[in-house]
Image (cartoon, rainbow, N blue to C red):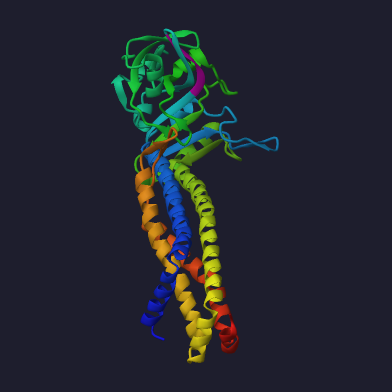
Amino acid sequence: MSLRLVLITAISSLAVNKLRAGLTLLGIVIGVAAVISLLSIGRGAQDAITERIQTLGTNLLFIRPGGTTQGGVFGGQGSASTLTLEDAFALQDAVMAPSVKAVAPELGTSGQIVAGRENTFTQITGVTPEYQFVRESTVASGQFITRTHVDRSSQVAVLGSSVAEDLFGFRDPVGQPVRVNGRQFIVVGVLESKGGGFFGSFDDQVVVPITTVYNRLSSSRTAQGGVSVQTINVQVNDVGSMDDAMNEVSTVLRIRHRITGDDDFTVSSQQETIETLEETTNTFIVFLGAIAGISLLVGGIGIMNIMLVSVTERTREIGIRKAMGAKRRDIMLQFLSEASLLSLGGGGLGLALGALLSWFLNDRTLGGQSFQTSFSGDFAVLALVVGAGIGLFFGIYPAMRAAKLHPIDALRYE
């Protein structure tokens, strides 16, 4: 039997029961569309978070205290006060750390910010002027923290965009007084919105001079008496120098801390953060695809059910064809072709519907949640291959059952 004749026969057999075939087709359509749309949402979320982190710069190193084993207990990142302002200044040495372009230490706390009748509780980040360029923080109005502010421990503040909106609405906050943990500060600038990040929102913070945090808001010293910092952000000359910079930074800190055993600090890169995030979100995407795949499984069971019904209804037809010389493989091929047409047709329609849903949901806000989708060709190929595979898998048993029918018994069937 030629392939053309097999296809014509399969289409004719399906056309006899249009409603039944259509409902079976609908199960595959829904399954494929669900897989594609959910995978697109997951990939879109991954791309959005990765892009947001990359806007901070990929040539960044983060040095945090901790990473030592003290008394048999491992100290995690940020669990010890081992980094100081002097450490940050030492990393700017062009001889010891030639791969380092700029250094920006951070000292954070939290507190109540009050402006008139409005107030909010937010993160307070103590920084130096280099922070603006290392972390690519653009000022929307006013100015950023200056060296003079740091030297004088000035009570000035640069507001994140969401904090400025919460406290002042549409008014310009620059030059206005605010109270930070009961102390009066003057707003000298407002940062442009950067959106949320992997470690929280960069808009929901107040930036002040690092010396002001230490002297006015949250005094903290190391065991040796140095001014403690929570993070040292290091900007490397270029991405290709990341490994050299990590070695140089580690060497400088080991010398300063007189370390002969385990480090009392941890050095990580922005790229490591992105890779860790991608691993996490890939698991999330696979989980979404697996959930959507359940609907494909249900659609495959529907194909098996309809093909078994078809075999029962067409028992006499199978007997007549076998009596006229049709071989077992011809009968099996006929029913497999019908199952494949259902699965491939449903896969094609599901692909179109899934792509349409991905386009419709992109940049849409539903229930207060903004969706960003990312449709790619590998999703389409995966959905079609899986859809066709499910059709063949669930169509094999009915086809084998039809092929095994004895022609005499089939002709006697009422």
In the rendered image, the residue lying farthest to the right is: 71
- Does the magenta portion include 109? yes
Q: Residue at left 47%, top 80%?
A: 333
Type of secondary structure dominating the magenta stretch: strand
**Measured from the top left, where is residue 178 in percent x and y?**
41, 10
Q: Which residues are magenta?
A: 108-115
**Measured from the top left, where is residue 236 in percent x and y?**
38, 39
**Measured from the top left, where is residue 308 in percent x and y?**
56, 71
Question: Is residue 95 or residue 355 the one in the foreground?
Answer: 355
In the rendered image, the residue lying farthest to the left is: 141
Question: Is residue 179 or residue 125 the one in the foreground?
Answer: 179
Q: Residue at left 54%, top 16%?
A: 219
In the rendered image, the residue lying farthest to the front is: 414
Q: Is residue 317 above or below residue 92?
A: below
Along the horizontal axis of the image, is 303 left or right of 150? Answer: right
Residue 360: which quarter of the image?
Answer: top left
Q: Residue at left 60%, top 31%?
A: 79
Residue 222: which quarter of the image?
Answer: top right
Q: Quadrant of the N terminus?
A: bottom left
Q: Is residue 320 above or below residue 233?
A: below
- Does the magenta portion include 234? no
Whether residue 268 is visible, yes or no, is yes
**Measured from the top left, where is residue 337 in percent x and y?**
45, 75
Whether residue 374 is visible, yes or no, is no
